Each structure stands twice: as C-alpha cells, then as structure tokens.
Image (spheres, rainbow, N blue to C red):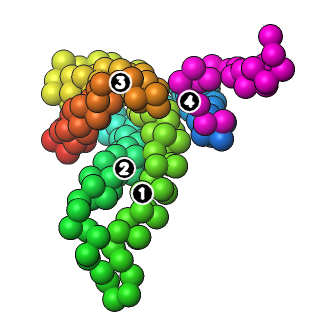
Amino acid sequence: MKQGSLSQRKTGFLANFIANPKERRRTNLFLMMMVVVILAEVLFVYLDRQQLMAQDFRQYKGTFKQFGSIAQIGFYAAVSIYPVFLLLKNKQLKRMKWGTIELKTILQFVGKLVRTWHVPIALLSTGVVFLHVYMAILRGFKLDFTYISGIVTVLVLLPLMYMGLKRFKRKDRNWHLKLGITFLILFFIHANFS
C-alpha cells in the first residue's frame, strides 16, 4: 500500500459515518459522555434504590419528571437546527436587514452554532431521557397514556439516532428529518398531555 493511503485510513467506531475528524472526535466525546451519564444514573438508582422506593410516589414522580424536563429542553435545542436552516433557504431573506446588519448573516452564524451542537446536545439529552425512562419503569409500568406515549416516543428515538449517523453521508433518504418530526410531535404530546 502507498504511504498516502495509510495516512488517510480512518479508524474508530464512527469513521465509516463521519468523515470530518474534528466532528468525529466531538461526536465520540459526547457519545462517551452519554454512556457515562447512563452508567452513572444506573449506579445512582442502584445505590439509592431503597430511599427512592421508600419515597411517596408523587415525590418520586417529581424526581423523574425533572429529568424528563431537562431532556425536553435539550431536545428542543437540538431540533432548533430545522427552522434555522429552513429560514436560510428562504430567498427573500437576502433583502431583509435590521439596521445595517443583514438577517441572513445572523442566521448563518446561528446555523453554524446549531449545526455544531445539534449532535452533542441530542446525545446528552438521550442519556438524560434514558434516566427518565429507567426511573419511570422502575416503580412499575402502567398501561396508561403517559407510559405508552413515552415508550412509543423512545422507540422512535432509537431509529432516529441511527438515521442521524447515516445523515452524515446523506444516505438516510431524509428519514432523519421524517423521524425527527415524528419524534418531536410524539415528544410534545407525551410531555404536555400526560
């Protein structure tokens, strides 16, 4: 093999999905952080299991709902990438100004920011939502709207994450966007009507 081809060889779990090494390192870092969050939450619940089980159910429910609220804020921040890029596609935006500043310049800056942090925020929010799910099911699964809507939402989240990986190479056939919209609707229903 040639020396040049060896130096260009990509290694690691995400190498087949993410070509940009800087983005791959950031995604790996936040993927590891997500795993650490999940392991820490399982350890936390395991060590404090007796105290958590002894709590009044309302107090316990308040605890795991707080984790759900944190994940909700994170997912809404991650989803903000879609309206920003939709606005950037608007051709009338080029003429809009706010004083001497063009609106398109501001949106391009915000677009770069949300593009950079979309995956890390989504990964951390996924870790937090797994704590929410774990704690909700730990005290018993109920066959009601809240639990069923939560489970359906998490079941949509898993292929959404996989299609997000495929999105880096544009091989998702827009399934990441479709699943993202579906997840957002289901998540909104679960969070606000339960």
Q: Earlier in the sequence, mark 1 or mark 2?
A: 2
Residue 37 visible, this orientation? no
Are dots 2 and 4 in contact, CB under 8 Å? no
Q: Amino acid at mark 4?
A: Ile
Residue 111's place in the image compared with 75, above or below, is below
**Mark 3 — residue?**
172
Mark 4–mark 3 Cα distance, whole angstroms, equals 13 Å
Residue at 40%, 46% in the rendered image: 78
Badges 3 and 1: C-beta atoms under 8 Å apart? Answer: no
What residue would you read off at disc 1? 111
Specify the farthest residue to the bottom: 99
Looking at marks 4 and 3 on the same chain, the residue that comes earlier in the sequence is marked by: 4
* Mark positioned earlier in the residue sequence (3 or 1): 1
Q: What's the amino acid at mark 1?
A: Gly
Between discs 1 and 4, the one toward the N terminus: 4
Span shown in magenta: 1-21
Q: Is residue 73 left or right of residue 49?
A: left
Q: Which residue is mark 4?
A: 18
Using the image as rendered, state which of residue 173 and residue 176 is in the foreground.
173
Q: Is residue 56 left or right of residue 145?
A: right
Between marks 2 and 4 in the image, the one whose residue lies nearer the viewer: 4
